[in-house]
Image: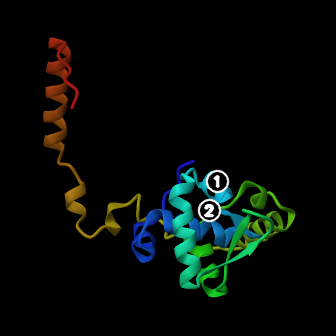
Amino acid sequence: MSFRINPSIEKLFGSKTRAKVLGLLANSLEPKTGYALSKALDIGPPKVYPILKALESAGFLESIVSGPGFKRYFLRDDNLRQFLRKKVRIAFEEDWFRPEMMRERRAALASAKRLTFKVPKGTARSPKGLANRVEFIRPREKDLALARIAKKRRRRGTVQSE
C-alpha cells in the first residue's frame, strides 16, 4: 500500500522511507522486526534494515533481541513518538483494530461531535458581501448576446465544447 508523506516531514527526516519507518514505529504498540516494517510499508527489506541500523546507532531506536536473527525495534524518545503520531499516521492492521485503539478513536470522534462553530450567513448567496460585487454581476446585454450565439450554434448544429 502506498502512503503519502508530507514533503516537509520528508525533508525533516531526510528521506521518505526513513519518515515512513519512524511513523510506523511511533504508531506501533509493540516493538517490530525490520521484516514486519518492510512488509507493512511495501518497501524491500534491503532498504529498511540500513535505516533501522542507522537510527539505532544514532540513539533514536532501541532493539530487543528475541532469539537468533530476531531483532525488534522501538522508538526511545516519547516526545519524538508524540510528534510522529500527529504528523505521520501509519499503523499496523493488528494495532488499528486493537480494543484500546478503537476506544481511543471513538473517544476522539465523540469529542469532535461536541465541537460547534458558527457559519456566517448569506455571504455566499448575496453579492453584497463581496469585495467588488460588480465583477460578479453580468450585464443584461451580455446575457442577450450569449443567448443569440447559442441559438445560432444550435441552428447550425455546431455546438463546440470548451
Query: Where is residue 26 shown, x and y percent of the image?
Result: 65, 73
Question: To which residue does mark 1 refer?
Answer: 40
Q: Residue furthest top?
A: 156
**If the image is split into quadrants, where does the C terminus sit?**
top left
Query: Where is residue 4 shown, x and y percent of the image?
Result: 49, 57
Task: Between residue 45 and residue 97, name the one nearer to us.
Answer: 45
Instruction: Name which residue lies at 62% across and 73% down.
Output: 85
Q: How is the image coloured?
A: rainbow
Instruction: Name which residue lies at 58% across and 75% down.
Output: 84
**How many labels were placed on the picture?**
2
Query: Where is residue 16 shown, x and y percent of the image?
Result: 45, 64
Task: Between residue 83 and residue 149, name the one nearer to us.
Answer: 83
Residue type at numbered disc 1: Ala
Instruction: Name which residue lies at 60% across and 65% down.
Output: 89
Q: Secondary structure at mark 1?
A: helix
Q: For residue 78, which numbered disc appears in the image? A: none
Q: Residues within 10 Å of mark 2 (few under 14, many from 20)?
A: many
> Based on the displayed image, in which of its 4 quarters is residue 27 positioned?
bottom right
Q: How far is mark 2 from mark 1, CA to CA?
A: 9 Å
Question: To which residue does mark 2 refer?
Answer: 90
